[in-house]
Amino acid sequence: MKGAIAFLLALASLAASDAAAAQNLVVIANVGSGVDRLTHDEVVNIFMGRYGKLPSGITALPLDEVGNKATFYRELIGKELADVNSYRARLMFSGLGSPPRQTDNVDEVIETVVNNKGAIGYIDKAKVDRRVKVILDLSQ
């Protein structure tokens, strides 16, 4: 009985930390991208491979960060990674899109965004610095 209670408490704690992380995710872009804001739908379309360009006309380079990927897609479209991957597989098979570039950590996301005008990624709001521009706050 004690083991079951401990397990449930640990599970609840994990869910609460996941929810807190989701509330702090922001989508960032290069300051020279020509984009000040994107709508929720525009971000969905870019990350799901439906749009290949930013509204400014620059080719989009969406970035998936391994540590926040599951949380991001749950927050953005309400789907689990298996569903997202299945959709992308169909899109790629039809030749209509490609998945975002994979990054290993937040620092790699920031550096890639800083060095590529079309790059957009998602990071914890607390990691934002003046080298990047927040174009969508998922907590709002």
Image: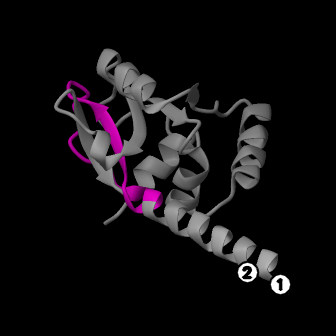
The x and y percentages for residue 42 are 41, 50
- In this image, 5 relative to 22: left or right? right
Q: Do tag 1 and tag 2 residues touch (Cβ < 8 Å)?
A: yes
Nearest the eye: 12 or 3: 3
SS at mark 1 in the image: loop
Q: Which residue is mark 1?
A: 1
Question: Where is 25 relative to 56, above or below?
Answer: below
Instruction: Give the residue at the far front of this rendering.
Output: 2
- Quadrant position of the C terminus in the picture: bottom left
Residue underneath mark 2: 5
Q: Is residue 105 left or right of residue 131?
A: right
Residue at coordinates 40% horizontally, 26% vertically from top-left? Answer: 107
* Vertical position of residue 77 compared to residue 108: above or below: below
The amino acid type of the residue labelled 1 equals: Met
Residue 107 or residue 74, whichever sits in front: 107
User: What is the span of residues highlighted in magenta in the rendered image?
Assistant: 21-40
Q: What's the residue type where badge 2 is placed?
A: Ile
